[in-house]
Amino acid sequence: MSISVIVPTLDEEHLLSACLSSVRSQSVSAQLIVVDGGSSDGTQAIARAQADLVIELDAPALAEQLNVGASRATGDILVFLHADCQLTDGCLERIQTICKHANIIGGALTMHIQGNRASYKMLSFCGNVYCRLTGTLFGDRAMFIRRPAFETLHGFRPLPIMCDVDLSHRMKRIGKTRLIPGPVLSSSRKFDHEPVWLSPLLILWALAAFRLGVPGERIRDRYYESYAHRSGRKAPLK
């Protein structure tokens, strides 16, 4: 089964090269697609040097970027990888292997936050347990899905936030999903400018609000305004 890896970007020149290199270094070859949402830095140049296909959109919209990338993909399996994440050795091979099971339509990989702080290990462990127990999958865990299932579900819905969580819930309605060993290495930038407990608390609030039907715009504004205030930079595509 062939694989296409789709990476959405917006001003990711500092992290993108490592992300794309981690895909190229896998034992299983994959089509590599970058969908940029109008970067103003060197992101597009890096993408053109390393990716098989670079698609440039006028403005960032995560669901649209992912869907457009999927529409141009040739693989039997679609993998969605955030630009501030890296695959470790064997990740694509394990995705390919699990998707050979007829009843598995997709899933995600375990995630490890980069850095040596003990709290990062605890956050990574707790996040993986949450995903395993609830079946909720997040974009920073390299979500993957078979192409027929993605087309049946009509891809990501154009939600203001949590289009990845929404897709993972809909995936469970038509087949089985699995959280499999990775790990995906995720940047610690969300935690660098705040108490380590604050971001997980905000994520849990956003998940609860999403499940309770709070309007997505309100969740997005609260989450991303808090991120920008804490970090001093624009919110990443996640």
Image (cartoon, grey):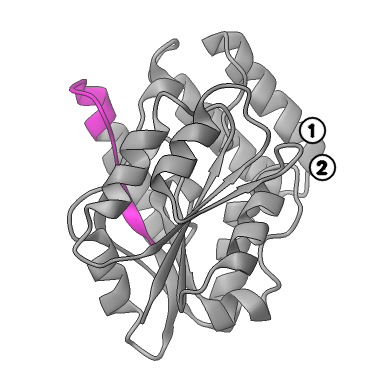
Identified by mark 2, the residue type is Pro
Looking at the rendering, the stretch of residues picked out in magenta corresponds to 108-121
Q: Secondary structure at mark 2?
A: loop
Q: Is residue 77 left or right of residue 162?
A: left
Q: Is residue 8 above or below residue 165?
A: above
Can residue 184 be seen from the camera position used here? no
Task: Please tell me which residue is depicted at 76% across the width and 39% down the height of the picture.
Answer: 58
**Image quarter in which the C terminus is found:** top right
Asked whether 127 or 184 is in front, the reply is: 184
- Where does label 1 land, which residue? 218
Q: CA distance from mark 1 to mark 2?
A: 5 Å
Tag 1–tag 2 contact (CB < 8 Å)? yes
Q: Is residue 49 visible?
A: yes
Q: Count the numbered circles shown.
A: 2
Q: Position of residue 202 (x, y in %)?
A: 56, 28
Q: Residue furthest bottom?
A: 102
- Residue 184 horizontal/vertical position (percent): 30, 47
Going 51% across and 31% down the picture, which residue do you hit?
A: 43
Q: Is residue 110 magenta?
A: yes
* Residue 18 magenta-highlighted: no
The dot on residue 215 is: 2
At a point 40% along the width and 50% down the height, the residue shown is 141
- The answer to whether residue 77 is left or right of residue 111 is right
- Residue in front for this viewpoint, 24 or 132: 24
Asked which quadrant contains residue 126, the reply is top left
Q: Is residue 115 shown above or below 211?
A: above
Left or right? Give the position of 108 relative to 64. Answer: left
